[in-house]
Image (cartoon, rainbow, N blue to C red):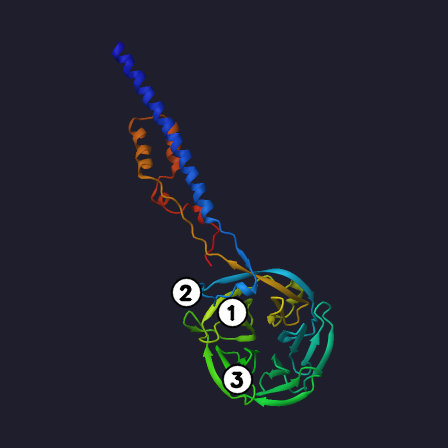
Amino acid sequence: MLLFSFKIIMRRFFRLTLHAFALLLVVACEAGQESAQAQAIVSPRAENISNSSSMQTGNIARADEVPVYTYEVVNSWPHLKTHFTQGLVYYDGKLYESTGQYGSSLLCRLDLKSGEVKKKVDVDRQYFAEGMTILGDRIFQLTWQAHKGFIYDLKDFKRLGEFVYDGEGWGLTNDGQSLIMSDGTDKLRFIDPQSFSVLRTVEVLDKGQPLLDLNELEYIKGEIYANIWHSDRIVRIDPSSGRITAWVDLTGLRQPEDADDSDNVLNGIAYDSKNDRLFVTGKRWSKLYEIRLVRKERYKVKVRPRPIFTFTFCLLPFTFRTQPPILLFMSSMNLSSASFHSPPSLTRGMVAV
């Protein structure tokens, strides 16, 4: 009788010990999940243009890992809604703009803070003005389908001459030596600013496919920034090879009141190299923005695998026909093949960019 009572006491003690151990394992697993979740959360980095270049040594993206940036609005200023922006340049502390549409195309200098036109010259009604750039003391302006560009004096906007080119004119910038021109295709032409002969051409590919509709251009810190017609994205391009070095996603920047026409899209990039400021606007937008680029991080969820002994001890109490609490423990452990991978609670809502 005494031996039988001792066996009962030992069996109950053993069960209580197993329950206590199981509870400790639950706490340990939950702590591991919290640790894994902490490893999975990565804060985006805000970067100035001067240190965000993907061309810098040690920061060149692999072909299958092109960096993506979003933005923070630093400042905004009025922009004339009558201006169908085709080219935008910030030069020597002043803002210049080329606007399109037949009969209303012009070249102008603007006051950044008020958006007021300080100086302008109208383009002949038969021309649809496009991109523009400033090189030295001259302004170069393209037209859309006339195969012709205009040259102006920087100070008084007096027309100095014309130049011709094949195909359409879309965007225009320069690298200090050559004019760089887009024509709505996937190609960028490098043009001699004196003879206007094409020095070379680069093709821009996105995952092996031609990236069409390259539009307004800006040369920034050794990269070409290009708007893409009817897109909220800017692509950053290596001028030597045409390789895409980064994307800039400006989704949400256009205000509802500026979306009353399908052509009122993002277009216009300017850079203040002295103060490291990036400006963007759009066709007939009411605002011009200074933005700061913010790097989107690729989420890498690292979940510590649950030790195999955890699974073993989960099953061991069950073999002794324990009470329902152990079943609750097993349910909390999610004992399935999925429980040995990333928990759904960690991966839900995360997007790899």
Relative to 210, is 351 above or below?
above
Whichever of labels 2 and 3 marks the residue nearer the N terminus, that label is: 2
Image disc number at residue 314: none
Would you identify the image quadrant in which residue 128 lies? bottom right
Q: What is the CA distance from the residue labelled 3 to the residue labelled 1?
A: 21 Å
Q: What is the CA distance from the residue labelled 2 to the residue labelled 3?
A: 30 Å
Residue name at image x 37 percent, y 27 percent: 19
Q: Secondary structure at mark 3?
A: strand
Would you identify the image quadrant in which residue 219 lies? bottom right
Q: Which residue is mark 1?
A: 235
Q: What is the CA distance from the residue labelled 2 to the residue labelled 1?
A: 16 Å
Mark 1 residue crowding within 10 angstroms, few (<14) / some (14–19) / many (20+): many
Whichever of labels 2 and 1 marks the residue nearer the N terminus, that label is: 2
Relative to 274, is 130 above or below?
below
Q: Which residue is mark 3?
A: 191
Question: Is 56 or 279 nearer to us in this picture?
Answer: 56
Question: Is 155 or 343 nearer to us in this picture?
Answer: 155
- Can the viewer see residue 345? no
Q: Which quarter shows the N terminus? A: top left
- Can the viewer see residue 94? yes
Residue 204: x, y in percent?
Answer: 46, 75
Q: Amino acid at mark 1?
A: Val
Residue 228: x, y in percent?
Answer: 54, 72
Q: Amino acid at mark 3?
A: Ile
Residue name at image x 41 percent, y 45 percent: 343
Residue 120: x, y in percent?
Answer: 71, 80
Q: Is residue 185 left or right of residue 63?
A: right
Would you identify the image quadrant in which residue 308 lies? top left
Q: Which residue is mark 2?
A: 62
